[in-house]
Image (cartoon, rainbow, N blue to C red):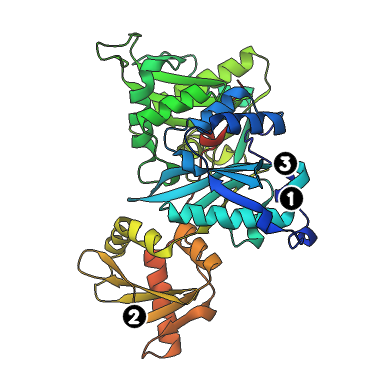
């Protein structure tokens, strides 16, 4: 089955290492932000250089409700347009906090100028643009992580695709009493309609709040996703049988769950957590549809930490098969440590209170030589930009990204203490790191990045 993520793949991202330092006259190239009137140039360039891009996707990328025209960069050689880069601005759920992030949607270059040297120059400019726009973290989906690793990015997430035989899925649901037995409160399952947008937004927010990695989606953003049509089907489960909008133009029934598909694969699934019935009935609907169309298995995007993965674990228990990674992963780069730590304060304070540790300790983080202090006070954590702390951790940018984002701690080589024996100091650092930056299940949904086929 085809892979579900389709991005602006360019030969430059896969350039061999020997090309990364190709000599070129960079002075002939200029990188400028697009203007609101530049859509014709944007459309013409992509439609003429990317034959796999449909008109609907080009228009959807330009009309992204969360973006500004200046988030699209034009690369010109003299007066000729030779490349396009586009960023997306988002807010990302991170436990009790939200983090401002920028994602690289992709770039496209004309073959005659496509080289590793220009790609490195572009990526550097993209990072600068992300940072100037207020993003604390940069993200990108890629099938070629080597290029980004060489530029200081780190891999933070790989997809987990679970394939379940259709008959096995139906049998598991039957054993749970879902199939062949009418539920007490019958649910109405049907394709999503326009008046479901507000309910979709509320359900999604309730499902992902407190998780690590999903983007915020307003009703306006959901409308954009529906217009983009990056999915094949969006199926919703509603309580009761009433199936018409109310006077306010919204669904009059309570929306309890949904799933989206692409090429037969469930790419995202959400349902209310206080009841198991919506998730089970949605899965039943998917497996019965697969059976009707003679599909031997149902594939689901079920990244660890996501709600879909939790549903399958509860349904199958030890019988849940191991997933396999897709051919793309998410790379991340910490753009502004101070902004990230400040945005993360609600989550850091929550972790501190959960640890039960007495206030008064302080942890110093020296990131590429820049000092930050996390001071544990009565009911919160404060971030100070100074070098006064009980103990210190020296971090490279790679290590800081992994520590902040997924809780991957550095080796003991960088742990230092002030006025404490070395063994005691290292132990205190490890304890504070465990309290403030524990390992977490970071995940991203591919639904935000699926290309339109229209």
| Nearer to us in this view, 216 or 437 | 216
Residues tagged 1 and 2 counted as in contact (Cβ below 8 A): no
Which residue in the protein does label 1 denote?
14
Disc ID at residue 110: 3
Q: Tell me the residue that label 2 is attached to.
A: 389
Q: CA distance from mark 2 to mark 3?
A: 52 Å
The quadrant in which residue 112 appears is: top right
Tag 1 and tag 3, C-beta contact below 8 Å: no
Q: Nearer the viewer, mark 1 or mark 2?
A: 1
Q: On screen, 264 above or below 161?
A: above
Q: Residues within 10 Å of mark 2 (few under 14, many from 20)?
A: some
Residue beneath the point at 66% across and 47% down: 78
- Give the total of numbered labels: 3
What quarter of the picture does the C terminus occupy?
Answer: top right
Q: Is the residue marked by circle 3 packed among few (<14), some (14-19), or many (20+) residues within 10 Å?
A: some
Residue 238, horizontal then vertical, whole percent: 37, 18
- Left of 229 or right of it: where is 219? left
Residue 155 visible somewhere in the drawing: no
Residue at point 78%, 56% (across, down): 16
Q: Earlier in the sequence, mark 1 or mark 3?
A: 1
Estimate the x, y position of residue 263 in percent, counting from the top left. 64, 24
Which of the two residues, 150 or 365, is positioned nearer the viewer here?
150
Q: With respect to residue 268, does 240 lie above or below?
A: above
Pair 1/3: label in front? 3
Between 280 and 392, the residue placed more toward the observer is 392
Q: Quadrant of residue 390?
A: bottom left
Label located before the other in sequence (1 or 2): 1
In this picture, is 90 found above or below 25? above
Residue placed at 31% from the left, 20% from the top?
254
Q: Residues within 10 Å of mark 1 (few under 14, many from 20)?
A: some
| For residue 192, side relative to residue 118 (left or right) | left
């Amino acid at each position: 089955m085809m892979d579900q993520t389709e991005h602006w793949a360019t030969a430059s991202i896969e350039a061999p290492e020997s090309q990364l330092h190709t000599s070129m006259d960079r002075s002939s190239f200029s990188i400028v932000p697009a203007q609101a009137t530049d859509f014709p140039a944007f459309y013409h360039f992509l439609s003429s250089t990317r034959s796999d891009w449909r008109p609907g996707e080009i228009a959807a990328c330009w009309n992204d409700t969360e973006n500004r025209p200046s988030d699209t960069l034009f690369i010109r050689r003299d007066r000729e347009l030779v490349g396009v880069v586009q960023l997306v601005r988002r807010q990302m759920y991170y436990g009790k906090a939200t983090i401002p992030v920028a994602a690289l949607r992709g770039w496209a270059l004309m073959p005659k100028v496509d080289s590793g040297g220009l790609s490195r120059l572009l990526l550097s400019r993209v990072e600068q643009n992300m940072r100037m726009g207020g993003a604390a973290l940069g993200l990108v989906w890629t099938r070629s992580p080597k290029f980004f690793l060489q530029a200081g990015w780190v891999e933070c997430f790989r997809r987990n695709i679970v394939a379940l035989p259709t008959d096995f899925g139906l049998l598991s649901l039957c054993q749970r009493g879902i199939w062949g037995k009418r539920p007490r409160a019958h649910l109405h399952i049907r394709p999503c309609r326009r008046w479901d947008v507000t309910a979709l937004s509320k359900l999604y927010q309730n499902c992902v709040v407190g998780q690590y990695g999903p983007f915020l989606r307003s009703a306006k953003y959901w409308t954009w996703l529906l217009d983009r049509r990056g999915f094949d089907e969006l199926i919703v489960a509603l309580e009761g049988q009433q199936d018409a909008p109310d006077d306010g133009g919204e669904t009059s029934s309570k929306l309890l769950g949904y799933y989206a598909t692409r090429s037969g694969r469930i790419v995202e699934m959400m349902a209310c957590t206080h009841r198991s019935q919506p998730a089970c009935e949605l899965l039943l609907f998917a497996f019965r549809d697969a059976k009707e169309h003679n599909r031997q298995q149902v594939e689901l995007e079920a990244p660890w930490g996501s709600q879909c993965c939790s549903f399958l674990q509860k349904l199958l228990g030890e019988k849940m098969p191991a997933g396999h990674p897709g051919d793309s992963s998410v790379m991340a780069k910490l753009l502004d440590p101070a902004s990230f730590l400040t945005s993360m304060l609600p989550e850091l304070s929550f972790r501190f209170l959960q640890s039960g540790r007495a206030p008064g300790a302080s942890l110093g983080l020296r990131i590429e030589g820049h000092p930050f202090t996390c001071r544990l006070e009565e009911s919160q954590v404060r971030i100070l930009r100074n070098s006064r702390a009980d103990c210190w951790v020296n971090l490279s940018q790679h290590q800081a990204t992994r520590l902040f984002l997924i809780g991957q701690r550095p080796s003991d080589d960088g742990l230092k203490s002030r006025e404490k024996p070395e063994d005691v100091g290292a132990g205190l650092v490890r304890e504070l790191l465990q309290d403030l930056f524990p390992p977490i299940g970071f995940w991203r949904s591919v639904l935000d990045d699926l290309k339109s086929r229209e």
